[in-house]
Amino acid sequence: MTKETILSIADQHFRNANPGGNKWAFRKIFYGPFIPEKKLSTARQAYASFSPREEAPILLYDDTLFGTGKTGFLITNEKFYYSMTASYSGPDTVGNLELSDIHSFKVQINKMSADIFVNDKKLGNITLISREEALVVEDFFDLIRSDTLHVAYEQVAAASDTTASWRRSSNLRNCLIWKQLPKKNLM
């Protein structure tokens, strides 16, 4: 998926999901133009060391109590960067995943926190996300995955059409070869 495609999907999704119109109305997630520069800078220093020339930040989730941006996750057009606790009171887990490797993303809200599952495997724990914010992020990953599957389907269909054309054009040649092969090699 191209950078422009994913940014277009994100722009449309988050503008539709934002209940505040021109003002960003969520508490802990920030989209593209609404990501505060200081939070983004802190996240890049703490856990998301990406090059702004190569990647564009799409969504920042700040899981800190005082809004510093040192823990949480950041989604760019290429990767999912994260710094979360392994459990509610455990040490931080820091890493990144290629977006193309993410096939499912789920936020399971618990009483005191939420668990993040990527590809049906628990990745970590966050504490301050609301149910509405969780749904917005899950829906975004569903859109990325469905668009990726749509593009892959189109590529397979195009390849199938090419293969079918080749098969149709060489049908006579294949029939002639079939008749010439010894029957024992066909079994």
Image: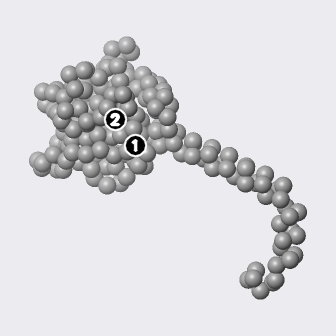
Depth check: give the residue in front, 111 or 100: 100
Name the secondary structure under disc 2.
strand
| C-alpha distance separating marks 2 and 1 | 8 Å
| Quadrant location of the C terminus in the rendered image | bottom right
Say whether residue 45 is visible.
yes
Name the secondary structure under disc 1.
helix
Q: Quadrant of residue 19?
A: top left
Residue for badge 2: 75
Q: Position of residue 89 (x, y in %)?
A: 11, 47
Q: At 12% from the left edge and 27% from the top edge, which residue is drawn?
A: 66
Q: At 13% from the left edge and 31% from the top edge, which residue is drawn?
A: 65
Q: Position of residue 162 (x, y in %)?
A: 73, 50
- Whether label 2 touches label 1, CB < 8 Å: yes
Q: Position of residue 173 (x, y in %)?
A: 86, 64
Residue for badge 1: 99
Q: At 47% from the left edge and 37% from the top edge, which residue is drawn?
A: 143
Q: Is residue 46 above or below residue 167?
A: above
Which residue reaches farthest bottom?
184
Depth check: give the residue in front, 121 or 107: 121
